[in-house]
Image (spheres, rainbow, N blue to C red):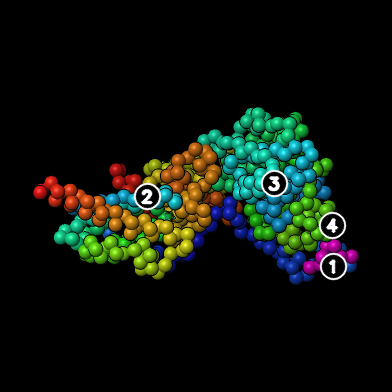
Amino acid sequence: MYSEKVMDHFMNPRNVGELDTANAVAEVGNPVCGDVMKMYLEIKDGRIRDIRFKTFGCGAAIATSSMVTEMVKGKTIDEALAITNRAVAEALGGLPGNKLHCSNLAADAVHKAIHEYLLKLKEEEKQAV
Amino acid sequence: MRKIYLDNAATTRVRPEVAEVMMTHLVEKYGNPSSVHSFGREARVAVEEARGQVAALIGAKPEEIIFTSGGTEADNLALKGVARANRSKGNHIITTRIEHHAILHTAEALEKEGLEVTYLPVDQYGLVDPEEVRRSIKASTILISVMAANNEVGTVQPIREIGVIAREKGVYFHTDAVQAVGNIPIDVNADHIDLLSLSGHKIYGPKGVGVLYIRRGTRIQPIVHGGAHERNKRAGTENVPGIVGLSKAAELARIELKEHMDYLKGLRDRLISGLLSIEDVQLNGHPERRLPGNVNVSVRYVEGEAMLLSLDLKGIAASSGSACTSGSLEPSHVLLAMGIPHEVAHGSLRFSLGKFNTQEDVDYVLEVLPEIVQRLRSMSPFAAAR
Ligand code: FES
């Protein structure tokens, strides 16, 4: 039921783990089936220098986590924000219909981490003024 | 690659003896049992012999055996047939929260027809309390339906105690014995059962055939209308190859029951103790009142589907009560009814052993699973604190 690409990312996930140098971290939970995905980003000069993930979920959830880290690594914040859930699923060669919500989790987690990072940045700027 | 089938609660491999008799009735003795000619007569003889074999397995009389298309139809016939035939007596049915969907969804459909249904809770082991059954009986109660053994966690219910209460109160007692028959002793008289569902493909017989045992004198209406087959209780030309296959499977199950139980228990206990030696693994279901072939554990911090995929890549077939494996994306209703938290239900794994499994199969699982668990835990945010 999963594409070869999904199975590859599931069995050999890229960028799995935690990141000591992370300055943007976000966790998202899936209300549909109760899974959890955590993203660790190191952002420098508006670019994602490094990224790691940890996921509790099905094969699709692990594969989309892995895929999204590959897609956004080295990208600018804006480029990363433009990557949709759909793009992640497509990059994996598609997902079974009932697993599409799992791909929501991956891009959402990255976006959430970026948004929190930007918010923090703004606060810091405010304080500096 | 080595392939190991540990999903015998889902379905079983047809025994060669069964396949052989079925073949005869597909290509040689293919008559319609309702026909008067010799082809029809030999098919009729086979069907009636099968009735006798199935009856013998559960201590019933042959005329109390009604062949159906499977366990699901048997459950539908039991509930709908009894409910509709006994409306003048009452409209209340008692069942449990851990029944198979064939019962639960039928009960829900009956609620839409105006029936009242009580869904009894279970304890942490998945056990129904017979006293709770007694307390739920009202003047309008017409039927109690409690499964003999649960398909997911293997808990064996106190059906005899429940049967005694039902008999005493004059309420019909149905049991879904799809998982129990052929795996534990069942006797419709000793257990005071009025209706019992069983299925061919769970006892090394074919798919597409099952039975509803209906105690003589039970008021019931057909749900499939047509010809006068099966004593007017189930219309449709008999699935003769399926029925003779089920017959053979039932005969062998009866003869081998004791030996079969001992064999499976040995494998089961070896697998359970091996699994429990992995850190943060718990047994789901009852430690003793358990089907001989059922193993159900929860592995903390990891999700079931991910484990199933990994096991499958190693050639091992199992199942899980995780939300991610169900079409509805809801975790197992059985595990939730037992009070098991969502995240623990998520990491559940069921291995159901069968007569074709060996000790080597069990040892192979115990060899590969720890690595799988370790790999998935290393990716899990929940295990991070460890
Ligand atoms: S994470 Fe539950 S279905 Fe994918």
For residue A29, the mark is 2
Which sits in the foreground, B264 or B29?
Answer: B29
Label 1: which residue?
B39
Q: Position of residue A114 (x, y in %)?
A: 25, 56
For label 3, the SS is loop
The lab-note entry on whether marks 4 and 3 share a chain reads: yes
- Can residue B304 be spotted in the picture? no
Q: Can you tell which of label 2 and label 1 is closer to the viewer?
A: 2
Chain ID of residue with mark 1: B
Label 3: which residue?
B113
Q: Can you tell which of label 4 and label 2 is closer to the viewer?
A: 2
Q: Position of residue B240 (x, y in %)?
A: 76, 62
Chain ID of residue with mark 3: B
Q: Position of residue B169 (x, y in %)?
A: 74, 31
Mark 2 neighbour class, 10 Å CA radius: few under 14, some 14 to 19, many 20 or more = some
* Whole-number angstrom distance, CA of label 3 to CA of label 2: 39 Å
The lab-note entry on whether marks 3 and 1 share a chain reads: yes
Chain ID of residue with mark 2: A
* Whole-number angstrom distance, CA of label 4 to CA of label 1: 19 Å
For label 4, the SS is loop
